[in-house]
Image (cartoon, coloured by chain):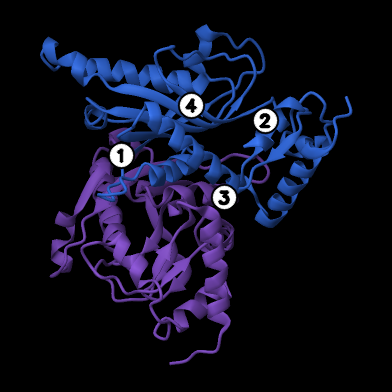
Chain colours: A purple, B blue
Amino acid sequence: MEFWQEANRKNQCLRSEYSVNSLLLFPTTMDERPHIHATYNEVHTIIKESAAKISQSFKPDVLIAIGGGGFFPARVLRTFFKDPLTKKNIPIRAIGLSLYEPLVDTSAEKIGTEIIRTQWLGADGIKSLLGRKALIVDEIDDSRTTLQYALSELQKDIELQLLDLPESEREANRTEFAVFVVHNKSKPKVGILPPNVPYFAGAEVGNVWLEYPWEALDIEEHDRLAAQDRLKSQEPSNP
Amino acid sequence: MEFWQEANRKNQCLRSEYSVNSLLLFPTTMDERPHIHATYNEVHTIIKESAAKISQSFKPDVLIAIGGGGFFPARVLRTFFKDPLTKKNIPIRAIGLSLYEPLVDTSAEKIGTEIIRTQWLGADGIKSLLGRKALIVDEIDDSRTTLQYALSELQKDIELQLLDLPESEREANRTEFAVFVVHNKSKPKVGILPPNVPYFAGAEVGNVWLEYPWEALDIEEHDRLAAQDRLKSQEPSNP
């Protein structure tokens, strides 16, 4: 995924040709970040390559999709984690989180209050995670706020369920978590993930505005802009 | 979406060039149906056109994705139901259903026993549907079994929640449901949907084996086969 590395390196140099567009998308704030368009096939390929890497150190037996952004990546990931012999799919559980970005003063202490659960796992859903390896899936790691929330809240619920088991069985049944995002933005993070939780990012990008194909009102135009982005990334930098 | 109409018309005439492939995919049964490959952009476009049609008679304010197949369609649909002025997204709730296809004797009476709920909405999730228009979303309507199950079980749960309201408020708060699938297979159905529930299918196909892009191990090869399918569909039929 050379393109993403290149986009990342050139992030500081790219001019903001899309500011008019950003203005339309964000009528209340000026977002001057360059827009980068990812095509379906690019995202699919990033996920394919990521699945191969993830499998080397963490073989998930359940995926937890953070909706709506994690739905597509989780569905594609499942294809690459399918057992080639038994043809068995690993299950996907979905949780829904909405992040309300405050304009200022985003401190780690405030994280919990900015996230709205639109869907969560019931007791049976949490129980079904015991003793398993669960990979939490989202499209992008921006501030890391949502990921921290998802992981820490799931871990809390797992601990509650473990209390129903004899103490000697808890350790073996504690869910092992890992996190996968298609893109990670290389920027200071508000949220924190514990160092013992494996973290996988399909590609690193700068602080760009990523335009995903599932958000495209005109998918042909989206692909045209994606091709243009690639051409631009091959031009010599002009800092 | 002329291609799908054409694929449907020619279904009886297509030879089964993919039987070796089918054999690999289904080691226990011979599946002789022709394989048709849908690209991401085609599915995206079908969903875009469908959203425009659905909006004319049913404006959903919540989507219910049947996972894993409904995840991608629901995510794309949300883009086209986004309010262009407020930029507000409608929420997606996810349910998980697995269909165990019996080899013989699929009768309407047996439907309930063949479906496993892998995820369902809790009481709060069901309550959040009251008074709303909910569109149930899946990728394909094959036997209609899963759709019947999803709709009837959701309706049952809604009725239970309505009992908590004064009788005079129940009618106004009864969730209105509709169903959307990307593809409907034109074949006899085992499941039944009530006639007062609007049903939308993005495209009609014959009893083919639909290869979705999110299932592709090699997305470039998948697209090549999709292009080949289109060429074939333009050839004069040779019954």
Quick one: label 3, few (<14), some, or many (20+) residues within 10 Å? many
| Chain label for disc 3 | A
A116 or A37, nearer to the observer: A37
Labels 3, 4: one chain: no
| Residue A100: x %, y % from top left | 21, 56
Are labels 2 and 4 on one chain? yes
Residue under label 2 = B5
Give the residue pinned by disc 3: A81
Residue, far bottom: A239
How much space separates mark 1 and mark 3, taking CA atoms?
22 Å
> In the rendered structure, which amino acid carries the disc numbered 2?
Gln
Taking the spot 69% from the left edge, 25% from the top edge, the residue there is B207
**Residue at the spot 52% in from the left edge and 42% down from the top edge:** A90
Could you say which disc has been placed on residue A121 in the image? 1
A100 sits to left or right of A216: left
- Check residue B200 in the rendering and tell me which mark sits there, or answer none: 4
C-alpha distance separating marks 2 and 4? 16 Å
Dot 4 falls on a residue whose secondary structure is strand
**Distance (Cα) linking label 3 and label 2:** 34 Å
Label 3 to label 4: alpha-carbon separation: 32 Å
Find out whether the residues at labels 1 and 4 contact each other: C-beta distance under 8 Å: no
Q: Residue at x 52, y 66 (%)?
A: A225
Q: As shown in the figure, which amino acid type bears the numbered disc 1?
A: Leu
- Residue B169: image location, x then y, percent: 14, 16
Instruction: First in sequence, mark 1 or 3: give its number.
Output: 3
